[in-house]
């Protein structure tokens, strides 16, 4: 059994882990980058990298030249009415997203980290070990890898989070998504607030996003299940019905579309039920629950958390956890402390979810609030340019803050993240 010691051990090489390893290696740290799968490998995802993520990729020097751009998003309500949400440029992010299949994005980030000096291990992190003040894991390969600090970037069902006692599964807001590629041409990202039965809304949404090439689309269903992971069954059961819905509405010709294999994955929403850092262990990306509870985006947040965690480790492993929690509290908590309680309160009531979808896409209402809805829903308020959209989004955040001020979930979330 070989033992390998590093300055930092990063478990998981998705966007969060690879960006963290890239920043650490460029900063001169000796980094181990562990992932259970060789690259390239696929992940269930809508494949859209939001404006903040596009900006971060630029800042860390990842070339996205040639990636398909995505701008305004169309939200289709249960009655068939739709609203176009504009994608405004901000002061700190561009006015577009990009389409990047996870087979390509994750491999590009992983390769960049390895090229910068991170040492890759293809193995599972199986048994936690602690020796000589270092923490780490015995891998499925038989190697023992330890570091001054461990970054858990191993997804919603994080082994690192569980081993460090940083997650309470009974309180996590779980989500599940199922995705397939289909032969269809989608020109603009589409969200469908779908009702499998009238006034019985899906506790989430369906999507039809542009693929990376013409003639291919990314189609999926994502739902929230609160703490009951067994409640994810409807995603698989209703997937064909959703494809039929897209066929009826003229989005996808189901009879002619070739559906590739379906791939599912778990999401951990809103940082709920998770302490993001303690001692020499920091959680980033999905492991920390950094997924938007209202629309499911996680790539931008994952990369931002990975970069921040790495920069703080480089400043000093002993103080990184406390500083990282302050970063998360300042950067993500203002939005998550409103979005997560709202998600948890609304989700068990399908008629209320249906009413919300119908109201937001009602004639006049949707168009009037579209700009602010886009800024708020996509958590783009910080950096939004002055104007009506920012005003609407600011009002929504303040109103949401007032409504959720006494929420027990909000108080516990603030304590878990900031320690206060």
Image: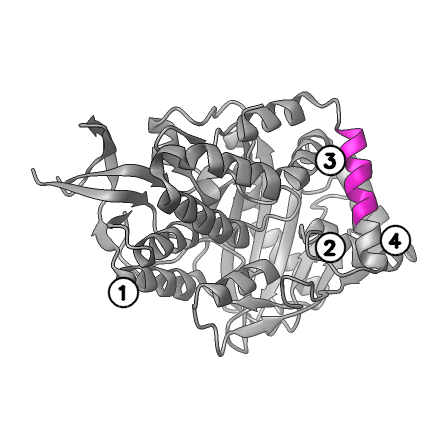
| Residue position marked by numbered label 1 in the rendering | 115
Relative to 227, say whether 150 is above or below.
below
> Which residue is pictured at 43% across the width and 68% down the height?
61
Q: In the rendered structure, which disc, 4 or 1, sits on the residue that comes first in sequence?
A: 1
Q: Is residue 217 among what the camera can see?
A: yes
User: Residue 401 lies in magenta, yes or no?
Assistant: yes
Relative to 98, say whether 226 is above or below.
above
Instruction: Give the side of residue 319 with respect to residue 327, left or right.
Output: left
Position of the C terminus, as image quadrant, is: top right
Q: Residue furthest front?
A: 315
Neighbor class of circle 2 (other Cα within 10 Å; few <14, some 14-19, many 20+) is many
CA separation in Å, label 3 and label 4: 18 Å
| Residue position marked by numbered label 2 in the rendering | 375
Q: In the rendered structure, which disc, 3 or 1, sits on the residue that comes first in sequence?
A: 1
Circle 1: element type: helix
| Residue position marked by numbered label 3 in the rendering | 350
CA separation in Å, label 4 and label 2: 19 Å
Please provide percent x and percent y for residue 221.
Answer: 58, 50
Q: Residue 362 carries which label?
A: 4
Picture quadrant of residue 127 = top left
The residue segment tinted magenta is 394-404
């Amino acid at each position: 059994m070989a033992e390998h010691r590093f300055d930092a051990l990063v478990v998981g090489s998705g966007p969060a882990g690879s960006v963290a390893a890239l920043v650490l290696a460029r900063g001169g740290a000796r980094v181990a980058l562990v992932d259970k799968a060789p690259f390239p490998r696929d992940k269930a995802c809508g494949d859209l990298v939001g404006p903040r993520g596009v900006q971060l990729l630029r800042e860390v020097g990842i070339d996205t030249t040639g990636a398909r751009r995505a701008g305004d998003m169309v939200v289709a309500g249960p009655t068939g009415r739709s609203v176009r949400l504009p994608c405004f440029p901000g002061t700190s992010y561009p006015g577009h997203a990009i389409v990047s299949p996870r087979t390509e994005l994750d491999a590009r980030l992983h390769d960049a980290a390895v090229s910068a000096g991170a040492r890759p291990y293809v193995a599972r992190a199986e048994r936690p070990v602690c020796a000589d003040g270092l923490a780490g894991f015995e891998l499925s390969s038989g190697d023992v890898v330890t570091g001054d600090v461990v970054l858990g970037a191993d997804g919603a069902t994080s082994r690192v989070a569980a081993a460090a006692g940083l997650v309470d599964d009974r309180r996590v807001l779980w989500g599940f998504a199922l995705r397939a590629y289909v032969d269809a041409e989608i020109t603009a990202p589409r969200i469908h607030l779908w009702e499998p039965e009238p006034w019985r809304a899906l506790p989430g949404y369906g999507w039809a996003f542009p693929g990376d090439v013409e003639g291919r689309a990314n189609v999926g269903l994502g739902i929230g299940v609160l703490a009951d992971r067994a409640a994810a069954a409807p995603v698989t059961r209703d997937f064909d019905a959703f494809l039929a819905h897209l066929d009826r509405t003229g989005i996808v010709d189901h009879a002619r579309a070739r559906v590739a294999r379906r791939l599912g994955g778990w999401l951990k929403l809103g940082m709920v039920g998770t302490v993001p850092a303690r001692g020499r262990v920091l959680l980033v990306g999905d492991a920390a629950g950094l997924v938007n509870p209202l629309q499911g985006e996680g790539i931008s947040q994952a990369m931002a958390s990975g970069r921040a965690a790495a920069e703080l480790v480089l400043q000093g492993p002993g103080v990184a956890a406390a500083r990282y929690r302050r970063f998360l509290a300042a950067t993500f908590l203002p939005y998550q402390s409103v979005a997560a309680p709202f998600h948890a309160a609304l989700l068990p009531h399908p008629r209320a979810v249906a009413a919300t979808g119908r109201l937001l896409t009602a004639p006049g209402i949707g168009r009037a609030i579209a700009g602010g809805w886009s800024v708020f829903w996509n958590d783009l308020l910080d950096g939004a340019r002055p104007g009506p959209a920012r005003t609407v989004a600011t009002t929504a955040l303040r109103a949401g803050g007032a409504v959720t001020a006494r929420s027990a979930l909000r108080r516990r979330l603030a304590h878990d993240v900031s320690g206060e």
